[in-house]
């Protein structure tokens, strides 16, 4: 399978779209995504690996 890159402005729903499609197709991906985590200093990002 070829690589697919989703691009767009912050908050437009790239990750949401990807995860909804994956749930509908009942498949998985490889790679990573960033997850926003609220903290006392503002927001930090955690890298989540997919396998």
Image: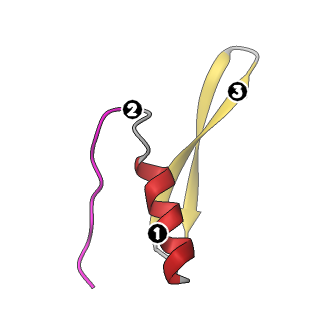
Which marked residue is nearer to the observer: mark 1 or mark 3?
1
Which percent across, then down, holds residue 48? 58, 55
Q: Residue furthest top?
A: 41
Which marked residue is nearer to the observer: mark 3 or mark 2?
2
Which is nearer the eye, 9 or 31?
9
Indicate yes or no whether the magenta region holds residue 6.
yes
Point out the stretch of residues depicted in magenta. 1-10
Determine the image quadrant of residue 4.
bottom left
Indicate yes or no whether the magenta region holds residue 50.
no
Tell whether 22 sits left or right of 14. Answer: right
- CA–CA distance between discs 1 and 3? 26 Å
When the figure is inspected, residue 17 is found, relative to residue 22, above or below; the finding is above
Q: Residue furthest right?
A: 40
Q: Which residue is mark 2?
A: 10
**Residue shown at the point (26%, 72%) measured from the top left:** 3
Which percent across, then down, holds residue 44? 61, 29
Q: Residue furthest front?
A: 24
Q: Which residue is mark 3?
A: 38
Which percent across, then down, holds residue 5? 27, 59
Q: Which residue is mark 1?
A: 21
**Residue shown at the point (44%, 61%) measured from the top left:** 18
Q: Earlier in the sequence, mark 3 or mark 2?
A: 2
**Residue shown at the point (70%, 27%) measured from the top left:** 38
**Residue shown at the point (46%, 69%) measured from the top left:** 21
**Pointer 3 and pointer 2: residues touching (CB < 8 Å)?**
no
């Amino acid at each position: 399978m070829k690589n697919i890159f989703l691009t767009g402005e912050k908050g437009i729903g790239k990750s949401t779209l990807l995860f909804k499609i994956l749930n509908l197709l009942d498949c998985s991906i490889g790679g990573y995504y960033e997850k926003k985590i609220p903290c006392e200093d503002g927001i930090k990002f955690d890298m989540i690996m997919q396998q």
